[in-house]
Image (cartoon, rainbow, N blue to C red):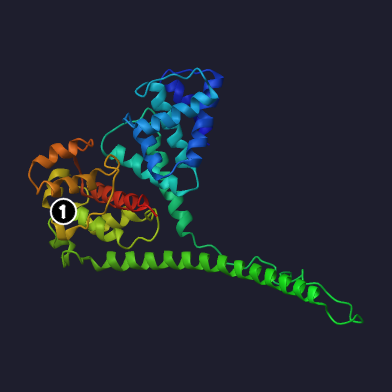
Amino acid sequence: MFESLVPNWLHRVELIPTSERLAAIIDTANEVASTANGQSALGVVDLAFSGGSDAAFALLSDAVRVRDATFGCAKGDLESRLVAAVTVAAMLESNSDTASNAAYAVLSEVWRGRKSEIEDLAGFAREALARRSEAHRARNVVAITTDMAGALKAVPTFDPDGGGATHEEVNRVTASVTKGLETVKRSFDQIAARVNTQLGAVDEELDVLWWAFSNYSSTSRASWEAVPADPRPIVMAAEFFRHLRFPVEPQSVDSVLSRLLGTSADQKIVLRDSIEALTDDQFNLPSFENQQALPVLTSIRECREFDRKKAWIASAARWGVDASQETTARALAIQTLGELVLARNLLPL
């Protein structure tokens, strides 16, 4: 549990809080992690990586102050960033889609080269994605746990030597039977949901495998070797994304993309070159608002809005995007895929 690590994290930066402050920080982290939605979670991640999210700071500082009235740190203070980072750790431990969204945001910050006071967050994020992927795609035994024989046990019985049933007694029988049948229906609804989830996981797996082994880009209508090297990782991520059915990528993403990229997987590539080489028909840009957590998607949008004029680079820099950033083809593909999943997760229901 993250709680046991908090004292070491604070001591690592020579911060030794009182026991009351330590308890306040841990309680705040647990509370915010349990109530955070996609947008607020991303704000906390931004603050943990020295960002300027006013809403996240207000949320955390108010929560800490309720528990410890002496808390009076400013947004840029070390302790405020640590409170945010501890809260992110709590989010990553949760068994909810908030963990996935926070994990994607953390990995985006790391990909951009930003650092948190808690260096363990990147590892926690990868563990969270693996855990949530398994939770969504696990092939569990489907069984009926409802006692069907007992579903109608509330139906009243009548004395075989008694007289005819009264209207009130018939109504009692009808209500009892209806309640029993509703119990049976809920049981089958639960089974259907679990079966549909498992079928979805199987269908996703088959779709991804057929796509990967075809070695063909339907977007470019050519083999992957024929797709230009600069836009290839982004195009590949977009096609991979179309086959995904859950709010987190499968654990095989690195292996699949590495296989398709082949010898070019570890070749260096500059973000600017990849973005500018990407044509509009190669990538369907989704709607999104969280520019800081989506550096690749933000770069694509800025480049298109400026008609590929070099001014897009300065515009993207407003959101902390360094267009001259050098990465590998595989890392760019994985980052783009994660951003597409996160953007979809954040769409309003």
Give 162 or 138, whichever is nearer the viewer. 162
Identify the secondary structure beneath mark 1. Answer: loop
Q: Which residue is mark 1?
A: 231
| 241 is higher (above) or lower (below) than 92 | below
Give 124 or 242, whichever is nearer the viewer. 242
Of all residues shown, which one is farthest toward the right? 161
The reply to whether residue 270 is in sight is no
* Res 223 → quadrant: bottom left
Of all residues shown, which one is farthest toward the front? 167
Residue drawn at point x = 29 percent, y = 59 percent: 240
Is residue 341 found left or right of 61 in the rendered image? Answer: left
Residue drawn at point x = 25 percent, y = 68 percent: 214
Residue 58 horizontal/vertical position (percent)? 41, 29
Residue drawn at point x = 30 percent, y = 62 percent: 242
Residue 82 horizontal/vertical position (percent)? 41, 27
* Res 125 → quadrant: top left
The reply to whether residue 89 is in sight is yes
Is residue 16 found left or right of 52 in the rendered image? Answer: right
Residue 343 horizontal/vertical position (percent)? 32, 50
| 35 is higher (above) or lower (below) than 194 | above
Label 1 packing within 10 angstroms: few (<14), some (14-19), many (20+)? many
| 298 is higher (above) or lower (below) than 249 | above
Give 143 or 76, whichever is nearer the viewer. 76
* Res 302 → quadrant: top left
Residue 283 horizontal/vertical position (percent)? 20, 57
Mark 1 is on which residue type?
Answer: Pro
Q: Quadrant of the C terminus?
A: bottom left
**Number of dots carrying numbers:** 1
